[in-house]
Image (cartoon, rainbow, N blue to C red):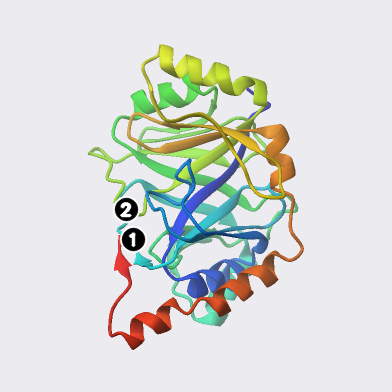
Amino acid sequence: MAMRRALHFVFKVGDRTKTATFYRDVLGMKILRHEEFEEGCKANCNGPYDGKWSKTMVGFGPEDDHFVAELTYNYGVGEYQLGNDFLGLTLQSSQAVSNAKRLGWPLTEVGEALYLTQAPGGYHFYLVDKEQPPNDPVQKVCLGVSDLQRSSHYWTTLLGMKVMDKNAKKKTVLMGFTDAQCKLELHDISGTVDHGTAFGRIAFSCPREQLADLEASMKKENQKILTPLVSLDTPGKATVEVVILADPDGHEICFVGDEAFRQLSTVDPKGNELLDKAMAEDKSDEWFAKHNRQKAAA
């Protein structure tokens, strides 16, 4: 299980321009790669949509050794309804705090050297006001669960994560595949988990040879498989195999074959340029304004 890696979390975004400002100028992340697609992904990477969309990977460094964000933008969809499933991403960077203050980006002090801010769309980010570490600044992703014991069993016994910390008072369990990776924190919300329409997906890699066994073990345990083992083609890039699962609360979990994914996730030096070009050419806001209409709310 130590060969499994935490890769990224998928966020649906309705405003690419404001979102790019947040990740680039506030957090200080880099555009790792940007891709445009004419139709929906057969693994529903962009949600339940069949139309044109884009994917932008952003992070503090390559996905080989950093946990990053995957930003999916569906042309024509302007906003998504948040649920209580994604509770926040925590990263350590005094520079991000400084950037937010300089740019007037709203910050709320919620603890000692800890600030809460929001990405466009309302996603919570917690900024630790300490010097950015030389390794990955992203510390953890927190997801809401309805039954902490049940979810802990799923993630540890069935997926192989190890528990790093428990806090009975806060009703949280912190876990991961290795100490050096971004952690997953489960927080018991004492109620039903609502995914809204903004629901995301957390992704991990594992050796390709483990994917079929993982799928088989989930079938044996009568666990939900959203997308059985499938190959995803990216023109001009590596073909990757994925299995997409759902935990007891419906959180989407993507496992991808590590060997091909390392090729697919290579940083594109033109990523920043490609994103800016796509945003400049996207006239959808102007079209909706001209026709006195608003983009759809998912």
Q: State whether residue 41 is above or below residue 167.
A: below
**Crowd around label 2: few <14 · some 14–19 · many ≥20 (10 Å):** some
Asked whether, in this view, residue 57 is left or right of residue 236, the answer is left
User: Which mark identifies residue 197?
Assistant: 2
Badge 1 marks a residue whose secondary structure is loop
Q: Position of residue 109 (x, y in %)?
A: 44, 65
Badge 2 marks a residue whose secondary structure is loop
Q: Position of residue 147 (x, y in %)?
A: 30, 30
Give the residue pinned by disc 1.
80
Residue at 46% in and 55% down? 11
Distance between the Cα atoms at labels 2 and 1? 5 Å
Instruction: Find residue 6 and report its image quarter.
Output: top right
Residue at 72% in and 33% down? 259
Q: Nearer the viewer, residue 176 or 69?
A: 69
Q: State whether residue 100 is above or below residue 47.
A: below
Query: Looking at the image, which residue sits at the far left?
Result: 191
Q: Counting residues from the N terminus, which is met first, the one under dot 2 or under dot 1?
A: 1
Q: Amino acid at mark 1?
A: Tyr
Q: Is residue 157 something one can see in this rendering?
A: no
Instruction: Find residue 148 and report its image quarter.
Output: top left
